[in-house]
Amino acid sequence: MTPNEIKQDFESAVTKHVLFKAKLRSFLYGNGYAEGPLRDPDQCALGHWIADRRAGAYVHVPEMANLDAAHRRLHRDAALLMDLRLAGRPEAAADGLPAVLAQAESIAALLQTIERTLRTEA
């Protein structure tokens, strides 16, 4: 892939990640969304992106395993907040949101690091 193609590929990943964060926040504040993609890292758009790239174009990038693990932890913790909301404890869910959003920021930073590495190698 060219550096520009890598940039575009990672921009699409970041967009998928931003949408996840917005949907989670919206769910926690009372709007309904399909729970599967919020709870299950294998159902969300970024999860599909990670799986496709780990098995394909970025199979040689060791940081992709770290990205996958961080992504799975994010969904696990998001599901806990969703459970709180569904159990009638929206305040507790909202209180936990900053920690989950901090995890999300670390995923965004990891995406940037991997992109930078790949663009340097290209």
Image (tube, grey):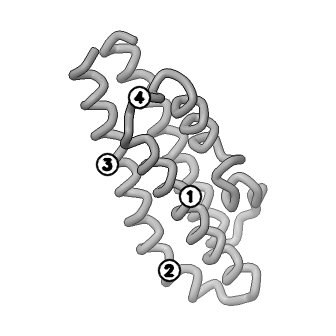
Residue picked out by circle 3: 109
Q: Which mark is residue 60?
A: 4
The amino acid type, in three-letter code, at marker 3 is Ala
Is residue 7 found left or right of 80 in the rendered image?
A: left
Mark with earlier residue (4, 1) = 4
Distance of label 4 from label 2 (alpha carbons): 35 Å
Q: As drawn, is 9 to the left or to the right of 106?
A: right
Badge 4 element: loop
- Distance of label 3 from label 2 (alpha carbons): 21 Å
Residue 11 versus residue 28 in the image, above or below: above
Going 41% across and 28% down the picture, which residue do you hit?
60
Rounded to the nearest angstrom, the CA distance separating label 2 from label 1 is 17 Å
In this view, the mark in front (4 or 3): 4
Name which residue type carries label 2.
Gly
Callout in the foreground (3, 2): 3
Local crowd size for mark 2, using a 10 Å CA cut-off: few (<14), some (14–19), many (≥20): some
Q: Who's the residue at 52% across and 62% down the image?
A: 74
Identify the disc placed on residue 13. Answer: none
Q: Earlier in the sequence, mark 4 or mark 2?
A: 4
Chain-order first, disc 3 or disc 1:
1
Q: Which residue corresponds to mark 1?
A: 72
